[in-house]
Amino acid sequence: MSRLSANLLLLLAGAIWGMGFVAQQTAMETLGPYSFVAFRFLVASVVVAPFAYLENARPKVALPALRPAHGLQFIAIGLCLFAGMAAQQVGLQTITVTNSGFLTGLYVVFTPFLAVLLFRQWPHFIVWPATLIAMLGIFLLSGGDLSQLQKGDLLTVLGAAFWALQVVLIGRFVGQSQRPLTLSFTQFIVTAVLAALVALSIESVTLANVVSALPEILYAGVFATGLAFSLQVIGQRYTTAPQAAIFLSSESLFAALFGAVFLSERIGWIGLSGCLLIFFAMVLIEVIPELGKARTQSLT
């Protein structure tokens, strides 16, 4: 798969996640945050399980043997996913979909720093200015006002740090096992189990509440989790973690768009300017490395 195709998969994942913010917020009219996360990832696990089985039973190419280290890597990614998802979902109880999308987008800044700190993976130089441009765009998309931060805002920032760590670990480990769908299934089931344990201890769940939130559970489970996270894992096999973070940050743009359409959260001219900056950052990430390759090839 080409890097362009991989980045387009990540962009599609961002769009699906953007709509997922709406489902996440409306579901909490009847379900607690941990209950919703548990049902969402249980559905995603069921959806991805057959594909993970086929990935191992009938591989198109020879795969390296699964080792205990791979399982530990997958579980570590699942722990990051649970922590990020839980913080984001609880935060959505007190902030808007648009602001949640903006603050979650902070992982576009955290990711290249974590990649350097943990694994000494230095990105292409264009990642740094593109990261700043994307963050400015996300800031403008929020309306350019970060005053009076609430508990939900701080939780969402914490969640963004865990999202960044998840992106970095996927970029580091998915190529070693060459099993993106098995990784997806593992991180989903880890998140579902942990969320269920928390939900059973602090939340009350009834069948009527689950039925009421079923459309949101199914969308979030099948599309925003099962499909989008699998697209993320597949796409990250062919691009770098910082570049992936830039394209995945488009979820903030789509969250604002769908928040306006379905929840009447309006985007002004400042927000639209932010949308353009985010798009510009994604174009820089895609075009500049290719121009550098073309120049190098012409000189050789």
Image: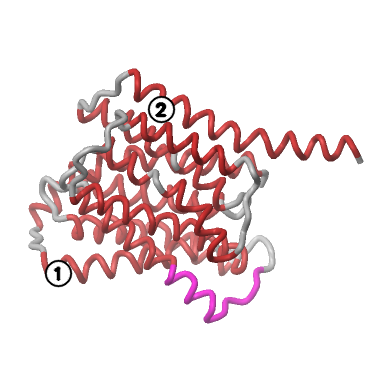
Residue under circle 2? 274
Residue under circle 1? 200
Label 1: few (<14), some or many (≥20) within 10 Å?
few
Residue 256 placement: quadrant: top left
Type of residue at label 1? Leu
Determine if the magenta segment contains residue 281. Answer: no
Type of residue at label 2? Gly
Q: Mark 1 or mark 2, which has the lower sequence index?
A: 1
- Residue 96 position in % (x across, y down): 21, 38
Relative to 232, say whether 290 is above or below. Answer: above
Q: Residue at x 36, y 34 (%)?
A: 139
- Residue 276 position in % (x across, y down): 46, 24
Tell whether label 2 touches label 1 (CB within 8 Å): no
Determine if the magenta segment contains residue 75. Answer: yes
Q: Residue at x 57, y 76 (%)?
A: 66
Q: Is residue 253 left or right of residue 68?
A: left
**Main SS category, magenta section:** helix
Q: Is residue 116 left or right of residue 40?
A: right
At numbered mark 1, what does the secondary structure look like: helix, strand or loop? helix
User: Which quadrant is home to the C terminus?
Assistant: top right
Considering every residue shown, the one lying at the far front of the view is 147
- Mark 1 vs mark 2, foreground winner is 2
Q: Residue at x 56, y 38 (%)?
A: 129
Relative to 157, say whether 54 is above or below. Answer: below
Magenta-highlighted residues: 63-76
- Residue 111 position in % (x across, y down): 49, 53
Relative to 293, say whether 54 is above or below. Answer: below
